């Protein structure tokens, strides 16, 4: 069953957001640059754990890209192209087609039938940008 594998939270001030989430939840937040390989570097990786210290769902804090940039959950699927086709068949919309995160995988950004952002994620170590 597909499940949430990653989340992203946009922020106007990454330092402020890092402090807030780090102190509120005890999340480990590291500056790793931009996982897509682009040079902007406005991305912080988030590591979470449960109360027993076991790893939880990871995520990222990223520089807000516009007034309507919302938090997004990434749902792991076997194939993003097939899942994207099903999104459209069920009345959702594709807002960003298949995009590579080099060495990690591919994602597709969508809107569900209620205009909520969701993204599809496919693990693929061989992923590379065009």
Image (cartoon, helix red, strand yellow):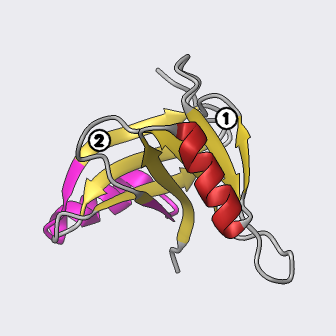
- Is 6 on the left-hand or right-hand side of 73? right
**Residue at 13% across, 68% down:** 91
Which residue carries the number 2 mark?
96
Q: Which of marks 2 and 1 is nearer the N terminus?
A: 2
Category of crowding for the residue at label 2, using alpha-carbon neighbours closer than 10 angstroms: few (below 14), some (14–19), many (at least 20):
few
Query: Which image quadrant for residue 41?
Result: top right
Region in magenta? 73-94
57 and 80: which is toward the camera: 57
Q: Look at the numbered disc 1 and give the secondary structure of its residue.
A: loop
Q: Residue furthest top?
A: 39
- Is 67 on the left-hand or right-hand side of 122? left
Question: Is residue 111 depicted above or below 126 in this figure?
Answer: below
Q: Where is residue 1 in the image (x, y as percent from the top left)?
A: 52, 81
Report the number of numbered marks: 2
Query: Which image quadrant for residue 84?
Result: bottom left
- The numbered disc on residue 103 is 1
């Amino acid at each position: 069953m597909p499940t949430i594998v990653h989340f992203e939270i946009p922020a106007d001030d990454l330092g402020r957001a890092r402090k807030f989430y780090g102190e509120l939840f005890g999340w480990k937040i590291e500056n790793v640059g931009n996982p897509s390989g682009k040079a902007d570097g406005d991305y912080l990786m988030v590591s979470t754990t449960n109360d027993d210290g076991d790893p939880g769902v990871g995520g990222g804090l990223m520089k807000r890209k516009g007034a309507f940039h919302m938090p997004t959950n990434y749902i792991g699927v076997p194939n993003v192209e097939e899942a994207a086709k099903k999104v459209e068949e069920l009345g959702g919309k594709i807002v960003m087609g298949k995009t590579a995160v080099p060495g990690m995988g591919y994602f597709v950004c969508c809107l569900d039938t209620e205009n909520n952002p969701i993204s599809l994620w496919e693990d693929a170590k061989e992923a590379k940008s065009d």
